[in-house]
Amino acid sequence: MEWGRAVEEEGSGVVVTMQDVARHAGVALSTVSATLTAARPVSAATRARVETSMTALGYRPNALARGLATKRSRVLALAFPMGPAGLSRTSAEFVLGATEAAQDRGYQLVLWPFAADAAGPLLDVAAQGLADGVLLMEVGLADPRVRALSEAGIPLTLIGRTAQGGLPVVDVDFEATLNAAVQHLAGLGHRRIALINHAAHRVVEGHGPTIRAGRAYHRASTSLGLTPRELHAGESVAGGRLAAEELLDGSEAPTAVIVMNEEAAFGLVAELAARGIRVPGEVSVAAVVSTPAVAGQTVPPLTTWHAPGSALGRAGVDTLLTVLDTGQVPEPVLIGCGLVDLGSTGSAPVPEPAADAPRNPPTLHR
Amino acid sequence: MEWGRAVEEEGSGVVVTMQDVARHAGVALSTVSATLTAARPVSAATRARVETSMTALGYRPNALARGLATKRSRVLALAFPMGPAGLSRTSAEFVLGATEAAQDRGYQLVLWPFAADAAGPLLDVAAQGLADGVLLMEVGLADPRVRALSEAGIPLTLIGRTAQGGLPVVDVDFEATLNAAVQHLAGLGHRRIALINHAAHRVVEGHGPTIRAGRAYHRASTSLGLTPRELHAGESVAGGRLAAEELLDGSEAPTAVIVMNEEAAFGLVAELAARGIRVPGEVSVAAVVSTPAVAGQTVPPLTTWHAPGSALGRAGVDTLLTVLDTGQVPEPVLIGCGLVDLGSTGSAPVPEPAADAPRNPPTLHR
DNA sequence: TTGAAAGCGTTACCAT
DNA sequence: ATGGTAACGCTTTCAA
């Protein structure tokens, strides 16, 4: 509808450029660009003409060209080491939060699956300009990726690692969470509160959550005058059962168990059920840094300190964008877990000595 | 180390362009490009010089510029509707397979989290040239995204949907899998083989797997002269228990159950355990289109027809690249599940009437 | 075999 | 407020 130029109305793979829109609207190319970016004032009249032309032609800005010109792709890469186990619910909540936050701020968030150890491909992607910055999930204490990326000067933000070396970081507040859990159980009268943590090799590998949760648990326990008892269980139902057996077979069986290992939680509950031990009547159980959606799967469902996935996601994006925009390293952001009471914790049982193992007050009868 | 030009050795955010490399190597820009793309012959000598210069300067090709020039980003988008439940193990295996296949063929595979219904953002990303093609996961029978993308002329491949409308597709071969499961159990002597499928509303919504699995199960059963009994269970432990109760309470309780619903499988096993029914002694259980990693979590672990996630991922990428390169629509690819026998299926119990419900041969005693 | 130059679709700056 | 035009970093002709 202008001087005789063949106008493709839609579809068919024909790319409509800014130049096309400009011609159609009878304005200069730079004016079209301006109405899009608001980089300079455009009169309402021309703006209207331009916008009409854009929709008429089905114009779509080319992100690559824009990125080349601005040196910004407006894409954020979320690098996560993906094993065959998939994405845990907690991670998923994180991703969703991050995705929303990114969109709110005009960025695209893409998940880039990378091997946990290989920094190379990650480096390429970032250095090639495909992503403006990188969100690194599940960072180990001595993660090769961190060194590589930060040395290459690629803006990044770490998820899941305490501040060290002045890198931008967001993380679960394990300290606060374990403290809350211990306090909660102690408040119910429990004196023997055990922790089932991740596998022992995780500690050796420098797995942050495992280490920090363990430390926080010990600190919280001793500060209340309780004797901590930490077990490491394999990440499996079987691992959980084993830990439970070890815990229950001794004479000093705990009356409350904190589990920081989702798979093992299933095993613990199964073992308790197999022994006919009532939850929370005889033993209280609390899942920590988990989610009710998972911890609620057991019978009975477990009271949970819900990992703040979504909030962490938002915080991660915000932090990364701050780095991108200002070059400054923001303070670490730590977010605690919220309590979701699903009824698996209750008052400590009255300390009645078991029949098989008489203790201090010499046999009170059963 | 050349005529006096300030040479940045690394890092520090300074971008090294092809022009820089050309100058450093004393060749033309186009020659550098040629050594990189092999688009034209380059003598070994100059190639060596160029490569030396590239590493000396720490050159990284700019993907955006290359994409702009070639009109190919060499990025494939894997669009998956991400809910808070995360990525199932099966999906994860798919993603891994796809990622590997993409890398093998020189492409980057990114996961683009999108709302299941919103086609808009997806369209933008693809139309903007950020991705060359789209892999659509979890496609519903009347998926708005499919229409939008194919109308926009964006190369795509569907995952999880039978061929219809001549679109490129890869999927699990439900027919073959359910058939194999039914045959396997019938071969063990079972005559009452039930199916616990996904929730009923899935059928209404046109959830492909649910519908096709159900159909295949019915077909396989009747072709063997068996009476099919299909139940729909909610995707939860509770849903599984409910279905189990319904199945077990009747007088015609099945001796074998096929479960095509991972969450419900947990409930089924729990209910069987609660009733003291031995698996596979009294009831055989088989998980279908699942993975041993999940179905092995129950006690006892379940014999599984393992969903071919990885193979599907590779097939999906291959199909999409075929579409991209040739514009042709390849034939649908269907891949069946492999059997992983974890011991939860066994011979059908001898049809001995239970003590509480005497049947044909009047009370043989227990 | 190599060099020079014209795009790719934008943005950003300089005029007007 | 608007129109030209030089980048952006690369691929791809076309000559030499």
Image (cartoon, coloured by chain):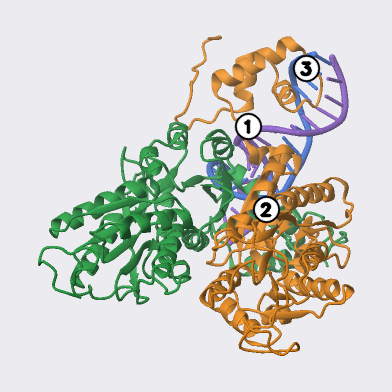
Chain colours: A green, B orange, C blue, D purple
Residue A273, horizontal then vertical, whole percent: 42, 70
- Label 3 element class: loop
The amino acid pointed to by label 3 is Val
- Label 1 element class: loop
Mark 1: few, some, or many residues within 10 Å (few <14, many ≥20)? some
Mark 3: few, some, or many residues within 10 Å (few <14, many ≥20)? some
Q: Callout 3: residue from which chain?
A: B
* Residue in the foreground of this view, choosing between B213 and B49: B213
Residue position for label 1? B61
In this image, A273 relative to A228: left or right? right
The amino acid pointed to by label 1 is Pro
Query: Is B261 rendered above or below residue D12?
Result: below
Q: Callout 2: residue from which chain?
A: B
In this image, A178 relative to B214: left or right? left
Residue B110, horizontal then vertical, whole percent: 63, 50
Q: Which mark is residue B94?
A: 2
* Residue in the foreground of this view, choosing between A136 and B131: A136
Which is more N-terminal, label 2 or label 1?
1
- Label 2 element class: helix
Which residue is drawn at the image coordinates 30% and 69% (left, top)? Answer: A283
Residue position for label 3? B42
Query: Is B12 rendered above or below residue B126?
Result: above
Contact? badges 3 and 2 (CB < 8 Å): no
Q: Judge if badges 1 and 3 mark residues of a common chain.
A: yes
Residue B256, horizontal then vertical, whole percent: 70, 72
* Residue in the foreground of this view, choosing between A312 and B187: B187
Mark 2: few, some, or many residues within 10 Å (few <14, many ≥20)? many
Which is more N-terminal, label 3 or label 1?
3
Could you give the CA–CA distance between mark 1 and mark 2, rounded to whole angstroms? Answer: 30 Å
